[in-house]
Image (cartoon, rainbow, N blue to C red):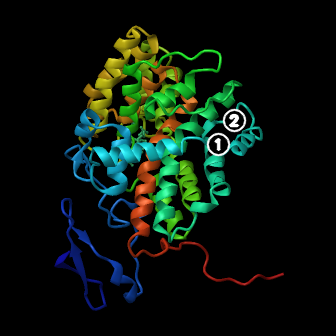
Amino acid sequence: MADKKAQLIIEGAAPVELPILTGTVGPEVIDVRSLTSTGRFTFDPGFMSTASCESKITYIDGDKGILLHRGYPIEQLAEHSDYLETCYLLLNGELPNAEEKAKFVSNVKNHTMVHEQLKSFFNGFRRDAHPMAIMCGVVGALSAFYHDSLDINNPQHREISAVRLVAKMPTLAAMVYKYSMGQPMMYPRNDLNYAENFLHMMFNTPCEIKPISPVLAKAMDKIFILHADHEQNASTSTVRLAGSSGANPFACIAAGIAALWGPAHGGANEAVLTMLDEIGSVENIDKFIAKAKDKNDPFKLMGFGHRVYKNRDPRATVMKQTCDEVLTELGIHNDPQLQLAMRLEEIALTDPYFKERNLYPNVDFYSGIILKAIGIPTSMFTVIFALARTVGWISHWKEMLSSPYKIGRPRQLYTGYEQRDLKK
Ligand code: CMC
């Protein structure tokens, strides 16, 4: 909705009137689309001041520490919903009634297996390959198997692909883990819920099927809910950009996985544990805090700070509580690495450097600790983030395709050579 207008005064040129758009909540947005007609562009590396699209899926107020999915606060979804219900909400805009939920769950369960031939892909990878490297490959490879749902202009195809991706991600993630361990891959079990089934495929073997702890399954489900979507972050924007060219959904999600991998984004949960290893013991904390503050040192405290949340990360609050529940269930409050993490949290929350810059522990700080306690290897952390975020990516992809959109094509401020002649 455009109510007000902004006026851009450019020296030596006529003023340019730019409409101001207002969303349902959130800051006003200056619509600069007409600026190109003046032969000028805006310059905003890192998209610090740029809304790349209009969306109805997720709202974040970073100053107040608010995260809403389709209007519902993340704390309420984590407390009263479950992951598949949250998936339905993100994909369809409303929470399902009992019948809709049962149908959706059954539909997802129908698609949990992956094509048998996909297994042979794994043999091409080294066993010590990073699981995210394998995920980029095998998720992209799904487009070679599910030709019957690749027409992006067909709403039914988009629907089937969305369900296939939500259903198959846990299976693929567990297959990656089993491959790295040299253990047989486990088939999904549709009598279990989403999180239980994932833990079953991860930790059970054909010769020993152990029951899944309800506390750990609940914690896993919460991790999935808390990572399900986060509006236009780097990986979601990557999925939208790839999708804007008309690429198929599996290829787009593979692009999202690649973008998520970096330590400033989804790779942070893995980086937290690597950092704790590097710090080693509580005595070394001061040295590493000093490194984090030193402008000439690239070291950062992993799991602290956020581009958008400058107050607190609401997901971290839920995750911290879940972290306590898991550590109590497993009786491992005394683990030296966990104690190190807790001491680091304490220092960072009281140190003026971190307080002044609002560098609070983010969701990845606590999720890393929980995943480690559950027994998931560090290299799998970002894979689990990707598994959970797939529904967010696919919801944004679907939203983009269901409304008029243009191929994403940013411009640049060119500072290279002017034209010159090649002289020989
Ligand atoms: N440790 C030490 N100093 C930091 C940290 C940190 N983790 N994060 C930011 N700072 C400092 C930064 O040096 C700067 O200081 P100054 O104002 O003196 O120059 C100030 O805080 C503001 O930081 P920024 O770099 O402008 O913030 P940003 O919005 O560009 O970066 C971030 C956000 C998440 C990339 C960054 O905080 C970071 O690298 N954190 C560690 C990695 C991490 O935990 N990432 C996971 C984010 S949550 C999961 C997700 O949503 O993907």
Is residue 395 something one can see in this rendering? yes
Determine which of the numbered discs, if any, sits on residue 133 in the image.
1
**Mark 1, other Cα within 10 Å: few <14 / some 14–19 / many ≥20:** some
Along the line of sight, which residue is nearer the eye, 344 or 81?
Answer: 81
Residue at point 52% right, 50% down?
A: 164
Tell me the kind of residue under disc 2.
Ala
Instruction: Name the residue rendered at 46%, 25% in the picture.
Output: 371
Q: Nearer the viewer, residue 5 or 148?
A: 148
Q: Quadrant of the N terminus?
A: bottom left
Q: Count neighbours of disc 2 (C-alpha within 10 A) and say few if under 14, some if 14 to 19, many if 20 or more.
A: few
What residue would you read off at disc 2?
Answer: 129
Horizontal relation, residue 182 to residue 150: left or right:
right
Q: Secondary structure at mark 2?
A: loop
Quadrant field for ligand 1: top left
Mark 1 and mark 2 in contact? Answer it, CB < 8 Å: yes
Work out which quarter of the rendered image holds the C terminus and state it. bottom right
**Residue visible at 58% across and 32% down in the picture:** 174
SS state under label 1: helix
86 above or below 340? below
Quarter of the image where one finds residue 318:
top left
Look at label 1 and name its amino acid: Ala
Q: Position of residue 191 (x, y in %)?
A: 47, 30
Residue 22 is situated, as x and y percent measured from the top left of the image, at 20, 69
Q: Give residue 234's position: percent from left, percent from top.
A: 45, 53
Residue 231: image tag: none
Q: Looking at the picture, does residue 60 appear above or below residue 154?
A: above
- List x then y, in percent, for residue 228: 39, 44
